Image (tube, coloured by chain):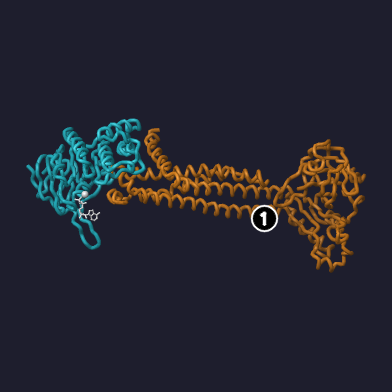
């Protein structure tokens, strides 16, 4: 306490010094403010993006292997002779699912799905939805909270019922606030009863299987109503493609079997597909990659952050050196009156502390506000981590003091008589 | 009793300062300027001494050494019986703070501080509480006749007014020794008389007063005169407390 009382007049002196040189103090602080603010904001944006990427990969399931139909490039397509007119025929087959299930060791379940974009309408309301024709196991593999009703059942499959499960997002767009369950919606040529609603997951670096306005219907119903061909009519005529399955999700017994499983799947499919019209994604590898990317990202961000803080520190040093030079005479006067060197050092050091702590605090606020605004206005997720606040603030204050120390020492080292002669 | 000292002897108890063959040389280019060229004298406690001499004779240089702002190039400066050469920077700083009041030839006020704040600076370093500093600054300002300008900045004052502030600040630490470099150089004769009256008062209170001037009528206030010429002591007159 005594120590604090002893230093209080010096702190006050430092504060009034800062106040007396308002414009300069403000500019010095700006460097720190933006240094700290940008560090925190950058880390928050980076963390938000990578967490989102990791989350969406994790949501794909680390035991899962995703096999997706890919339209082959036209040269490849022509050589297969599988194109008739403008109907492109490619992709995974019903048989592929069976082959994978039967031959690849360690497979727990396979979920086939066919995804098309079709118009859905309720009364006058109309919306292009992604229609996912799939099997009930989809909901075991791609787990989502059920908000109302139920998901698809084996019975739906058997009966080829005209029922659908919508994502929350689709519901909001299509049905608004009206009573939802049991309503009938028209999807292309079929009329479906809404059996349930599941939660959506939005956005993400890796698109989750249900990231949009989706309608899930039994695969059997889809085949009955729409067939495998999806034909669009446009001004240029008819254009379409015939894909039996857009996607097969293969769930393995555990993560250790994933790598071998994906190789086996690749082998099986390659045997039956002359052209490469499928792609195999392993979320586990994606996850590892994403984690690696995140580490790299953090290093790069850290370097940028360090540089911007360093720039702030150099700004402080620059201003303090200018200030010392400008105030050489004042230093001489104070020394002549009897101020010890240490008191001059303290005076200037408190000055830089006030600047760097003040700038640091404003920077903290800025660093929290920017990610908040980014999230509000762009829906981009951001995560402000407490450690980044402490880190940025600590480093900026530390740098401020270190860079302020040199000018302060230089100020005090001056011979009083030399300092007094300074004009 | 005034003797120009030629031999080294142990300083007397009441000798505030003693110069033993003090030299101060400046090197300008490859020329050596002998601002002080072997000066010896001593001043006793309670003396009132004027240092005279033409411009460039080394008066300010001598006063700066007396005020512990500068050190001799050679020779010894005894301060209260201690050799200044053996004192470190902190000891000299503390001596300036506690025992010396210095009125500079060009005032040396801090331009960003008000009159009151300038007067408070020594008290600040002495650790006096704010209220007491205020009170004392007002008292001192009143004593030098500047109390109507306490909230003004030095740049808003005339030369004579700044001189008064400089005197008030020099007295703020109740110094035992007051050193003044041409304290009346910027004052009209009426104000000069007022300031000299103040110095007289301090002298009567038992303080040691050393002032530099080139005006004989100002020097006449002092009880002893040291006349310098070309960095040497030309004569010492008056003899009261000065040897
Ligand atoms: N810092 C300095 N560098 C070089 N020469 C100096 C310096 N200060 C004073 N001098 C010289 O020393 C001599 C004495 O100067 P000074 O003590 O200021 O004289 P006074 O105060 O009697 O007019 C002068 O010739 C001056 O030019
Ligand atoms: Mg002079």
Tell me if residue B32 comes above or below residue B50 in the rendering.
Answer: below
Query: Is residue A238 rendered to the left or right of residue B22?
Result: right
Q: Is mark 1 within 8 Å of ligand 1?
A: no
Q: In this orientation, does residue B236 appear?
A: yes
Q: Quadrant of the C terminus of chain B?
A: top left
Note the chain letter of the orange one: A
Position of the N terminus of chain B, as image quadrant, is top left
Instruction: Give the labeled residue for mark 1.
Output: A289
The image quarter containing residue A237 is: bottom right
Q: Is residue A190 left or right of residue B210?
A: right
Q: Position of residue B13 (x, y in %)?
A: 14, 39
Q: Nearer the viewer, residue A360 or B206?
A: B206
Q: Helix or strand or loop: what does disc 1 sit on?
A: helix
Q: Which hue is chain B drawn in? A: cyan
Residue A253 percent coordinates (x, y):
77, 49
Viewer-closest of A80 and B206: B206
């Amino acid at each position: 306490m005594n120590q604090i009382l002893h230093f209080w007049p010096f702190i006050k002196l430092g504060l009034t010094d800062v106040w007396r040189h308002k414009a300069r103090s403000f500019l010095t602080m700006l460097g720190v403010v933006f240094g700290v603010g940008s560090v925190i904001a950058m880390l928050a944006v980076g963390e938000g993006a990578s967490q989102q990427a990791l989350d969406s990969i994790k949501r794909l399931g680390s035991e899962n292997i995703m096999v997706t139909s890919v339209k082959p490039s036209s040269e490849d397509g022509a050589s297969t002779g599988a194109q008739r007119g403008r109907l492109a025929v490619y992709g995974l087959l019903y048989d592929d699912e069976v082959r994978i299930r039967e031959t690849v060791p360690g497979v727990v379940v396979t979920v086939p799905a066919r995804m098309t974009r079709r118009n859905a309408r309720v009364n006058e309301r109309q919306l292009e939805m992604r229609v996912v024709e799939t099997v009930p196991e989809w909901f075991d593999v791609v787990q989502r909270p059920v908000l109302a009703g139920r998901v698809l059942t084996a019975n739906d499959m058997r009966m080829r019922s005209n029922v659908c499960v919508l994502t929350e997002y689709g519901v909001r767009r299509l049905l608004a606030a009206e009573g939802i369950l049991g309503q009938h919606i028209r999807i292309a040529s079929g009329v479906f009863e809404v059996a349930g609603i599941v939660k959506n997951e939005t956005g993400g670096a890796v698109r989750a299987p249900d990231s949009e306005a989706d309608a899930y219907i039994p695969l059997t119903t889809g085949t009955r109503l729409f067939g495998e061909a999806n034909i669009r009519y446009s001004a240029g005529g008819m254009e379409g493609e015939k894909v039996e399955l857009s996607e097969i999700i293969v769930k393995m017994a555990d993560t250790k079997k994933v790598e071998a499983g994906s190789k086996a799947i690749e082998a099986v499919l390659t045997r039956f597909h002359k052209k490469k019209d499928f792609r195999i994604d392993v979320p586990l590898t994606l996850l590892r990659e994403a984690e690696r990317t995140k580490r790299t990202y953090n290093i790069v961000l850290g370097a940028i952050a360090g540089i911007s803080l360093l720039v702030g520190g150099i700004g402080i040093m620059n201003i303090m050196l200018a200030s010392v030079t400008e105030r050489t005479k004042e230093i001489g006067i104070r020394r002549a009156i009897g101020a010890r060197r240490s008191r001059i050092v303290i005076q200037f050091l408190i000055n830089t502390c006030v600047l760097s702590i003040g700038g640091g605090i404003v920077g903290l606020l800025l660093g929290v506000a920017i990610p908040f605004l980014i999230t509000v206005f762009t829906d981009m997720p951001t995560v402000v981590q407490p450690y980044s606040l402490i880190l940025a603030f600590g480093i900026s204050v530390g740098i401020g003091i270190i860079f302020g120390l040199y000018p302060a020492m230089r100020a005090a080292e001056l011979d009083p008589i030399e300092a007094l002669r300074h004009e | 009793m005034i003797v120009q000292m030629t031999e080294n002897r142990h300083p007397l108890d009441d000798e505030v300062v003693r110069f033993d063959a003090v030299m101060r040389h400046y090197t300008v280019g490859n020329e050596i300027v002998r601002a002080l060229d072997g000066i010896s004298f001593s001043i006793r406690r309670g003396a009132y001494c004027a240092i005279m001499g033409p411009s460039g004779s080394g008066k300010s240089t001598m006063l700066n050494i007396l005020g512990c702002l500068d050190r001799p190039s050679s020779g010894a400066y005894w301060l209260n019986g201690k050799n200044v050469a053996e004192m470190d920077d902190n000891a000299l700083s503390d001596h300036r703070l506690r025992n010396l009041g210095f009125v500079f030839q060009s005032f040396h006020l801090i331009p960003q501080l008000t009159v009151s704040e300038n007067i408070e600076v020594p008290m600040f370093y002495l650790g006096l509480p704010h209220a007491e500093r205020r009170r004392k600054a007002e008292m001192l300002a009143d004593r030098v006749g500047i109390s109507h300008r306490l909230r003004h900045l030095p740049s808003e004052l005339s030369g004579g007014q700044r001189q008064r502030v400089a005197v008030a600040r020099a007295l703020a630490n109740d110094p035992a020794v007051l050193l003044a470099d041409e304290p009346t150089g910027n004052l009209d004769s009426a104000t000069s008389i007022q300031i000299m009256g103040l110095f007289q008062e301090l002298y009567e209170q038992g303080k040691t007063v050393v002032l530099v001037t080139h005006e004989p009528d100002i020097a006449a206030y002092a009880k002893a005169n040291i006349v310098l010429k070309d960095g040497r002591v030309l004569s010492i007159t008056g003899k009261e407390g000065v040897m």
